Image: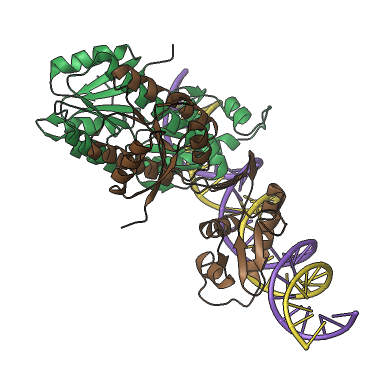
Chain colours: A green, B brown, C yellow, D purple
Amino acid sequence: MTKPNPVLIVEDDAEMAKEMAEILKGANCATDLCHTFEAGVEAASSGRYPVVILDRMLPDGDGADAVARLRAKGSNAMVLVVSALGRASNRIEGLEKGADDYLAKPFDPDELRARVRALLRRADSIAAENDFMVFGSLQIRLKARNVHVGQTHVPLSPREFDLLVFFARNHGELVTRMQLLENVWNLHFDPQTNVVDVHVSRLRGKLDRACARPVLHTARGEGYIFDPMRPIASESE
Amino acid sequence: MTKPNPVLIVEDDAEMAKEMAEILKGANCATDLCHTFEAGVEAASSGRYPVVILDRMLPDGDGADAVARLRAKGSNAMVLVVSALGRASNRIEGLEKGADDYLAKPFDPDELRARVRALLRRADSIAAENDFMVFGSLQIRLKARNVHVGQTHVPLSPREFDLLVFFARNHGELVTRMQLLENVWNLHFDPQTNVVDVHVSRLRGKLDRACARPVLHTARGEGYIFDPMRPIASESE
DNA sequence: ACTCACATGACAAATCCCGTCATAAATGCA
DNA sequence: TGCATTTATGACGGGATTTGTCATGTGAGT
């Protein structure tokens, strides 16, 4: 079994939310919960969730608008809108506003599972076709070979891009200079220079400036760690 | 009003097909019709239709398999499966087999329209994101800025790529040197040199070699014509 | 405070892209 | 066929970009 897929549920009814979470465990999903659209949009725009489930009606607004706000923030999550209003007209409005699927309450557990699975599959196939990596606001388009932070483009040289991709593929993990020489430079021996350091420095210069926070951390005596999600220098908790 | 969207309907019941076509006129669609999956898959794999509507059950097979065959042929059309079997289990199976939406018969005309519109919108956004032009075996990825013939990559310089894209946008039509200077070079006067000729020559060298046939034709005294579909040197029908 | 690892600015070699020119080839016409 | 005009293409050099090296600065840990 592969690792569970993160799914965000935005729902104010705690009972319903718990039920959905329970159902989705059967589809290999790890659910997180928000109680308001405000919080939901915020969480979803991190790019961590390939699939987001929105209740159509919450105290703080309308699901259709929430979808619009989400899209405006650059999220490309798959959105499933769940609604007590099951009539066709509502379904239509939801889909036209940018949701990817629509489900009426009350729903059959099997159907929820199936819908979410279909959305995950679609998210996967889009990601595979259009190869796309997201770390918070940092986006890497593998085929286009370009990098964006939020809406702004970060110009990288070919080497720098390859370097970043290697880091991204091993995000959160320690990467040694030797690994980099092997995989990015295709060198199977130590050139006895600091090529790696120089390129890491250049890459870091561009990325940190763009992200306005450190993303490439150095593990003294070991190597480097790429971890864009790491909270900004503060201890505790 | 923009120009109508081509939609392919695959349906054996002529009455039903006519009705759907009529309904979809209201969604600004130009519908074509096939009566069998065989013909439908063939027509759809031309890549001309962003949206394909499949009946679930036709004499020559099952819609779910047709979707699979379509995908295997490399089509990335959005597929809506319409079925008399409206139960959840069928809907689920359809979606999991690779269809993009599922609609039960009988349906509300408004709902068909809305679904198709949603699929068109999604097709658009995928096309915009993943912008892709195909001429026979020649594929141009606009964002990735790379070109493939069949499976092999054709390396082009930036200028050459821009040139090709301009030709591709005007494929089959005469393109003058002046147009190229204006649109590819951003020159609004004649530089009195043969820059264009030289770049066309270079581009042609790479493309013709890769395609193993002439793709960029010259219209003596007029300009050039990009036409990758043009049958190989032979007169008459 | 000292040492060693890492960071980074500067420089130079290598590469690639592009426009120009000169010359060859091809086309149309008389 | 021969001539004039248009197009094709090989070669050259300027210029920008990328990349690796080195020298020096900075900071962490002992």
Instruction: Classify the position of the C terminus of chain B by image quarter.
Output: bottom right
Looking at the image, residue A117 lies above or below residue A94? above
Looking at the image, residue B155 lies above or below residue C29? above
Residue drawn 12% across the image and 20% down it: A13
Of residues A70 and A123, the one nearer the viewer is: A123
Q: Position of residue B183 (x, y in %)?
A: 50, 66
Locate residue A103 relative to residue B83 in the image: left or right.
left
Q: Position of residue A236 (x, y in %)?
A: 26, 20
Of residues B226 and B92, the one nearer the viewer is: B92
Residue drawn 69% across the image and 55% down it: B214
Residue drawn 41% across the image and 15% down it: A3
Looking at the image, residue A29 lies above or below residue D11? above
Instruction: Classify the position of the N terminus of chain B by image quarter.
Output: bottom left
Kindly tell me whether residue A137 is visible in this rendering. Answer: no
Locate residue B1 relative to residue A84 in the image: left or right.
right
Q: Position of residue A208 (x, y in %)?
A: 40, 40
Of residues A52 and A161, the one nearer the viewer is: A52
Kindly tell me whether residue A18 is visible in this rendering. Answer: yes
Looking at the image, residue A185 lies above or below residue B171? above
Residue A126 lies in what quarter of the image? Answer: top left
